[in-house]
Image (tube, rainbow, N blue to C red):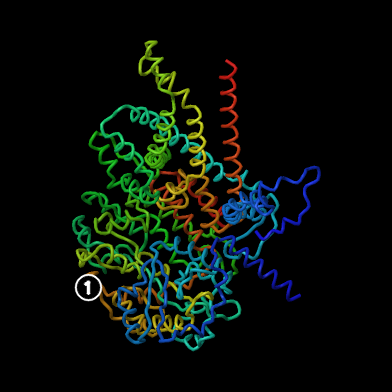
Amino acid sequence: MTLTASQAPAPPGRTAPPRRRGSAPRRAWRTFSPYAYLAPFFTLFAAFGLFPLVYTAYVSLYRVELQTPGDMQWRGFGNYTALLGDEYFWLALRNTFTIGVLSTVPQLVMALGLAHLLNYRLRGRTFLRTAILLPYATSVAAATLVFAQLFGSDFGLVNYVLGVVGIDPVDWQNDTVASQIAVSSIVIWRWTGYNALIYLAGMQSIPNELYEAAAMDGASRWRQFFHVTLPGLRPTIVFTVVVSTIGATQLFGEPLLLEGQISGGISHQYQTLGLYMYEQGWGFFHLGRAAAIAWVMFLLIVVLVGVNALIARRRSRKEAGR
Amino acid sequence: MPIARAVKRAAVRLGAVALTGALLAACGGSTDDTSSDGAGGKVTITVDLFGSFGYKEAGLYAEYEKLHPGVTIKQTDTEDEADYWKSLQTRLAGGGGLADVQGIEVGRIASVTQQQADRFTDLRKYGADALKDQFAPAKWAAATGKGGEVLGLGTDVGPEAMCYRTDLFKQAGLPTDRDELAKKWATWDGYLELGKQYKAKATGKSAWLDSVGSLYSIMIGQEKERYYDASGKLIWEENPALRTAWEHSVEAAKDGLSAKLDQWSPAWNQAFAAGSFATIPCPAWMLGYIKGQAGESGKGKWDVAPLPGGAGNWGGSYLAVPKAAAHKKEAYELIKWLTAPEQQTRLFEKQGNFPSATGAIEKVAGAKDPFFSDAPIGKIFGDAAKAAPVQVLGVHDQNIAQQITNALSEVERKGTSPEKAWSNAKKGVANTIG
């Protein structure tokens, strides 16, 4: 900041500010310092966020192979149109959606219930609140490898317990629905506590008077939950739904490590979009195609979040109009 | 014009960096190999391998370090070759993070010679030409580039046999003598027939073989032309030999002869000791793997017999030195020593990796292995190596094989109809190669 702003002419139409408000360099610093403080973030963002995004878009228009990255052939939107006719892509999209629903819905419902319970005056409340965050603190890889053992078809604990109850062993790897449930269960285990804490924070910002008033009117705990807690939590719920949707669309580590296969099972039965992108790029070395999938995923998330925001806005407008 | 070219080259390199996210590209290729001999003569040579090469287990590194004071060898190892190859390709494209010595599977060597000759050191620079007569001609030729570059030195070859559990055979009332078995399973039909007998009498959870994928792999190894013909054309879909291997694998799956295990998975590893299968098609390099997984308690329970349907070859490897390696000269000296006939001989005697050096093949002819009930492994694998066809190699061999075994797993584990599985294999291959 070696500005020689003192020589700069005063802006037209304005009288020179009084002296006591600081010298010209100080004023310049006051104007520009916010940008200086922001610069480190935006530099990093440009290098590791924006550039890869733009470069991926560029690569997605070419045929590029990892083994010969210098040899790029122009394909235009060929990579994208090829995806339309690619049944593995549609399968991965469908899997991403079903696994997303299978994991997000139970996860958020359970988180809501847990948060409600933790909001009561309980013995060891702080301990419990910390404890439910623990799964979130474990690494995806470690958790998935443990779950993979639990879901083992011959020596797995889950099938053993099912056997004790008299249920036939389930093929948690090869059966489509069972394998998707297995993947979803890992996601649910990891993220329920995290969402519960967010809900809990939201619940605590709901004024106590509302509950008192409701209790005065003779509302049961259950009715209080539905008519006071839930409406009060709406912004929080929208937030968790958006974050979970993004997470579900990008799901990668869990399906990759369940069997350690980039194909997501022998029939691609639990291959998500993220995994399909990885298979194209780092399994088959088709970087152009992988880049196209990455961009489709990005646009998909933008659309999903946009729809979510629209719905949320329309609902709150309806509330306001009532 | 040179400037334009330099810019273009810089752009290409930049592209490679951006594509892989490896920021070390600038170091790649610029390392001066004469400067690598450090001040005190202290050098650490890094070796990156897959599966089980067995050098460490056979004590070869320790001996090399003793012979060359100041040299330290550091090895990293990935179990599954497919994972190893992915990571190697990423690092090659970025030009960083490469070891001084990289292992290359024979199914990938065509990709190296045809697509990536510029990424590996031409070993003629260090006098590798002189080693040519040490190796079996086909082994040497496969690692030679279009311009005659020597891109890797052959380690082992994979002559095929059949490994089996004598204790499980006895329990099921089957003969355990390897010569008698060789007669009974002279053909693959005979092998599957014995499998049915085994299945009828076997106790507990023990199948005839580990997976139909391994049955397919060993059978296709008996063929000269597999996925490509000699002119480099893709022929796998019409190849009748491939079809035969496919159909036998389907039959084994339908008859329930397989333990339905995924090769190289943890469950497969556990099954060696648990006795989940009675036979496993074994190329020579599998012997070391079996020993490692079955452990001391498996000693004497295993045996080796000649393969049904004649000789074949599955796998075998090369050691190569990437251009981006830090210690190229030292790395060459190391791989030259490791692939010399004396060391190949010792490796076979300790670990079972069958030599590709012609001098070593003669030396091991009398070798026997106590772990495998004193089976004459030198003779069994030596005969197989002599009779095995010289295979036509192609760029996508490994990728195509993977899609086919994957489709066979669908038949094996999900009961998918063979027709559907075949069409899945075709779609999978198109997706991989396209």
Q: Residue at x 42, y 33 (%)?
A: A201
Q: Viewed as shown, does residue B250 lie left or right of B127?
A: left
Q: Within the image, what quadrant is residue A306 found in?
A: top right
Instruction: Please tell me which residue lies in front, B378 or A298.
Output: A298
The correct choice, above or below, for B243 with respect to B328 in the image is: above
Where's residue B121, x and y in %?
53, 78
The image position of residue B410, as x and y in percent, is 43, 47
Given residues A51 and A121, the one toward you in this image is A121
- Toward the viewer: B141 or A95? A95
Regarding mark 1 in the picture, which secondary structure is present there? helix
Q: Is residue B65 left or right of residue A53?
A: left
Asked if one can make out residue A290 in the rendered structure from this viewpoint, the answer is no
- Write down the residue under mark 1: B370
Q: Is residue A224 above or below residue B179?
A: above
- Image coords of residue A94 (percent x, y): 52, 39
Count neighbours of disc 1 (C-alpha within 10 A) and say few if under 14, some if 14 to 19, many if 20 or more.
few
Residue type, numbered disc 1: Pro
Tell me the residue at 37%/54% (across/down). Answer: B262
Asked whether B123 or B90 is in front, the reply is B90
Quarter containing the N terminus of chain B? bottom right
Q: Is residue B35 above or below residue B77?
A: below
Extreme residue toward the top, this view: A217
